[in-house]
Image: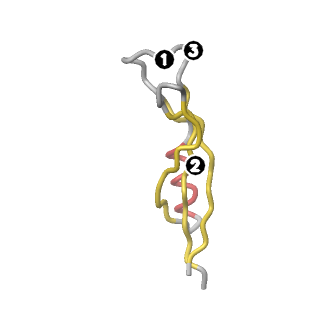
Amino acid sequence: MYTYEYERVHIYTGRTQWINSKNETTGHREIVARRAKAGWRFVGVIPIDQTASGVVVEMDLVFEKEVP
């Protein structure tokens, strides 16, 4: 059996959304590394919020850990 936890990540899109604009997440790699050290396994991403044009601006990182 597994237990799951989620961490919300905001994606910086800047002031305007252009076709060539670069979306940047803040801290997602550090979150995954920190959770891995604590024994959690990264299993996926759930989009939480998006703009009218479909650009994801918030997401949950999903982690699992086996329950003894």
Residue to which mark 1 is pinned: 17
The x, y position of residue 53, in whole percent, is 47, 25
The colour scheme is secondary structure
Q: Mark 2 points at which residue?
A: 60
What is the spatial separation of the Cα atoms under label 2 and label 1, in whole angstroms?
22 Å
Q: Earlier in the sequence, mark 2 or mark 1?
A: 1
Q: Position of residue 57 (x, y in %)?
A: 55, 33
How far is the residue under mark 2 from the one under mark 3? 22 Å
Q: What residue type is labelled 2?
A: Asp
Looking at the rendered structure, the secondary structure element under dot 2 is strand
Q: Residue furthest bottom?
A: 68
Label 3, label 1: how many angstroms apart (C-alpha)? 7 Å
Q: Which image quadrant for residue 49?
A: top right
At x 62%, y 51%, the residue is 7
Q: Quadrant of the C terminus?
A: bottom right
Q: What's the residue at 43%, 15% (across, down)? A: 18
Q: Which of marks 2 and 3 is nearer the N terminus?
A: 3
> Which residue lies under the disc numbered 3?
15
| Residue at the image position 47 percent from the left and 31 percent from the top | 54
Placement of 5 over or under 48, stated as above or below? below
Return the residue nearer the eye: 60 or 41.
60
Q: Percent from the top left, x then y, of residue 4?
A: 60, 66
Q: In which quadrant is the N terminus drawn? A: bottom right
